[in-house]
């Protein structure tokens, strides 16, 4: 939509071919339906938040930065707001308002919209000539922008079509993997915590050399297979070589308290419940669902009277709550990932225009390119910036 609106704004005759029965289907589910449009970080920070081929995006980010995107959306009538971590959302908290705004952008510049599925990009002497739709209809074109997304959330239409087109036209597509994806863990006890959401916890990710490679504070969720939630999704994009390396997570359930402070807190609770069993003395400290798991992992009998728990046992509980460990077994499938890592090789795309270096008049924008970023609005800004640049140069 950004590419089409921008190209048509230059006075070109633009047709947007949409596979779905409605526009912006994937945009509607971003940010839990609120649409985390972008981030208000500066451009250098943006580059740092794109671990895969971030430097390829210099031209795109500088030509159409987050400030220009927000300005454009504001001019079109969409009010925005900034939340924790610099995340930018529509003031209405509705992703549908972002879609409507982009539709307005295209309408203003008279983009022609066709609902249909492209099955082939036609070329002649290494130059694009048009596309063929599933119905057999052909549409002639001097320029074609492939903005088909990746392979995550296939029900929204991202079924990897762009990768297929790129390969057919001689492009290299790097290995496709899930990124920003829930994690499966080896520990069985997570099943007992399914559905439990924890807020204000700290999560650290370590590799097999016990080197900390990621740390964040916020919200996470236990599932029947492992863990999910914002900080887990962010952690997942730092896991690069799961086949040859072991990774584990360490969760600090009480990051606001030091070990000494937590020990004093537990002592107060144990005095308060001094006549109760251990399992009944943790209600003030932990969510109900978590208590039996913590009791089991602590190795202390659930029916031990609290006033008989030793100092060593109590310090063991402190250690457990500050360092709850989970070992990563694998990623959830690509279809459950927010972003697809991998895509059309950046060496084969001109970073200043988004045009293919192999086929004249062929452009790529968004997730179909081998770039992916952390959570926080960075991936959508990649889509907007590369879409704008392709629309400006096609």
Image (cartoon, rainbow, N blue to C red):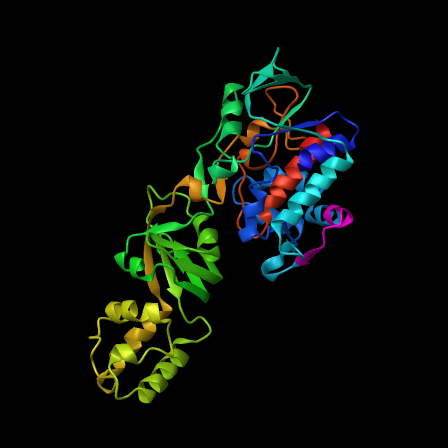
Judged left or right of residue 327, residue 173 is: right
* Outermost residue, right side: 11
Is residue 80 on the magenta stretch? yes
* Outermost residue, top side: 125
Q: From the top left corner, tell me how far across and down residue 17 is, in percent.
A: 62, 28
Q: From the top left corner, tell me how far across and down residue 34 is, in percent.
A: 59, 53
Judged left or right of residue 207, residue 66 is: right
Answer whether residue 358 is visible to the viewer in this image: yes
Is residue 160 on the magenta stretch? no
Q: Is residue 356 above or below residue 339?
A: above
Frontmost residue, 162 versus 28: 28
Frontmost residue, 195 versus 55: 195
Q: Is residue 381 above or below residue 190?
A: above
Q: How many marks?
A: 0
Location of the C terminus (image quadrant) = top right
Q: Which region shows up in magenta? A: 72-81
Judged left or right of residue 183, residue 48 is: right
Frontmost residue, 112 versus 170: 112
Q: Is residue 126 above or below residue 187?
A: above
Judged left or right of residue 232, residue 92 is: right
Q: From the top left corner, tell me how far across and down residue 205 is, in percent.
A: 40, 56
Answer whether residue 63 is visible to the viewer in this image: no
Location of the N terminus (image quadrant) = top right
Query: Which image quadrant is residue 88 in?
Result: bottom right
Query: Which image quadrant is residue 27 in?
Result: top right
Frontmost residue, 375 versus 121: 121
Q: From the top left corner, tell me how far across and down residue 289 is, in percent.
A: 33, 68
Q: Is residue 62 above or below residue 202?
A: above
């Amino acid at each position: 939509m950004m590419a089409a609106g921008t190209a048509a704004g230059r006075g070109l005759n633009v047709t947007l071919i949409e596979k779905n029965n409605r526009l912006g289907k994937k945009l509607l589910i971003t940010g839990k339906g609120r649409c985390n449009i972008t981030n208000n970080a500066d451009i250098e920070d943006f580059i740092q938040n794109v671990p895969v081929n971030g430097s390829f995006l210099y031209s795109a980010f500088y030509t159409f930065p987050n400030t220009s995107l927000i300005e454009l959306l504001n001019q079109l009538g969409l009010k925005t707001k900034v939340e924790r971590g610099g995340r930018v959302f529509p003031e209405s908290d509705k992703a549908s308002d972002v879609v409507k705004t982009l539709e307005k952008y295209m309408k203003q510049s008279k983009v022609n919209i066709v609902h249909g599925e492209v099955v082939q990009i036609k070329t002649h002497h290494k130059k694009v000539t048009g596309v063929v739709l599933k119905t057999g209809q052909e549409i002639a074109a001097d320029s074609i922008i492939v903005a088909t997304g990746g392979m995550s959330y296939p029900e929204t239409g991202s079924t990897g079509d762009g990768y297929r087109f790129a390969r057919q036209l001689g492009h290299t597509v790097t290995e496709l993997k899930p990124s920003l994806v829930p994690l499966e863990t080896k520990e069985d006890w997570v099943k007992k915590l399914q559905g439990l959401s924890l807020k204000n916890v700290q999560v650290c990710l370590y590799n097999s050399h016990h080197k900390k490679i990621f740390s964040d504070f916020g919200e996470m969720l236990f599932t029947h297979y492992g863990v999910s939630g914002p900080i887990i999704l962010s952690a997942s994009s730092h896991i690069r070589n799961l086949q040859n390396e072991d990774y584990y997570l360490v969760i600090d359930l009480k990051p606001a308290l030091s070990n000494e402070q937590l020990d004093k807190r537990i002592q107060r609770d144990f005095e308060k419940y001094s006549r109760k069993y251990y399992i009944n003395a943790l209600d003030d400290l932990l969510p109900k669902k978590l208590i039996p798991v913590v009791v089991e992992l602590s190795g202390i009998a659930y029916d031990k009277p609290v006033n008989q728990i030793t100092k060593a046992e109590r310090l063991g509980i402190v250690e457990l709550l500050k360092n709850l460990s989970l070992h990563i077994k694998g990623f959830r499938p690509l279809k459950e990932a927010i972003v697809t890592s991998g895509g059309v090789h950046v060496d084969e795309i001109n970073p200043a225009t988004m045009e293919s270096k192999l086929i004249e008049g062929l452009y790529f924008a968004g997730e179909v390119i081998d770039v992916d970023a952390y959570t926080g609005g960075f991936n959508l800004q990649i889509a907007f910036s590369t879409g704008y640049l392709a629309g400006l140069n096609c």
